Image (spheres, rainbow, N blue to C red):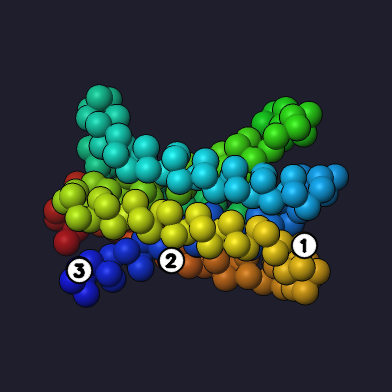
Amino acid sequence: MQTFDIAIFLHFFVGLIATVNPIGIMPVFVSLTGSMSPEERNKTALTTNIAIVIILIVALIAGQHLLDLFSISIDSFRVAGGLLLLSIAFSMMSGKIGEVKQNKEEKSESVSREQVGVVPLAMPLMAGPGAISSTIVYGSRYPGVTSTIGIAITIAVFAFCCWLLFRSAPYIVRFLGQTGINVITRIMGLILAALGIEFIINGLRVMLPGLS
């Protein structure tokens, strides 16, 4: 595997961390699983991250075909995805965790469900529009078989890291405190805003070549 390819996967991995912000979602995970036993909480964490892998890999493989079906260019989707990432980033930098990714109706419906691993944790909180759009953009930018496999592996590694994080979520939340989590959330929001601007610039550069 070439160093350039590794750099692509690392860039995508960091982008996923900034987009999903698993540390910022940990308090939500703890609150939704607070009444569960340790075994049930670990099972929910596993279910959540398996669902993340499935959702993002489906977006990686079929995302471009869906765009073609609706006659949407990847550059238009890149700009739209960048705007979406910016909106999430501004929400994160203002300290609002999860409010952009999950509306009130989805929240009220999910509370009554016993299994919260898929909804709302996997979708829309983690594998939400921002992560899906990032995956489609990277998959379209690097369409080769090797790159696709590498991105899929990166998604699996990311989900595995989130699983480890969620297993220790109660201890980490207790250690960081709400202030520490808010600081990390704002830093992730800044990184995500920069990534969104990069998406927008790359899309506009192709759509409006006069700007180059």
Q: Nearer the viewer, residue 42 or 19?
A: 42
- Which callout, 3 or 1, points at the residue further toward the start of the chain? 3
- Three-letter residue code for mark 1: Pro
Mark 1 / mark 2, whichever is N-terminal: 2
Q: Residue 46, image x and y in percent?
A: 60, 48
Count of marks overlaid on the render: 3
Query: Residue at 32% across / 64% down in the picture?
Result: 9
Residue furthest to the right = 35
| Residue at x 74%, y 45% (from the top left corner) | 40
Nearer-the-camera pick, 176 or 162: 162
Q: How far apart are marks 3 and 1 (CA)?
A: 38 Å
Q: Mark 2 points at which residue?
A: 14
Q: Which residue is drawn at 41% across and 63% down?
A: 13
The residue under label 3 is 1
Q: Mark 1 points at which residue?
A: 170
Instruction: Determine whether, in the image, residue 138 is placed left or right of residue 156.
Output: left
The quadrant of the image that shows the C terminus is: bottom left
Is residue 104 visible in the rendered structure shown here?
no
Determine contact: label 3, label 1, CB under 8 Å: no
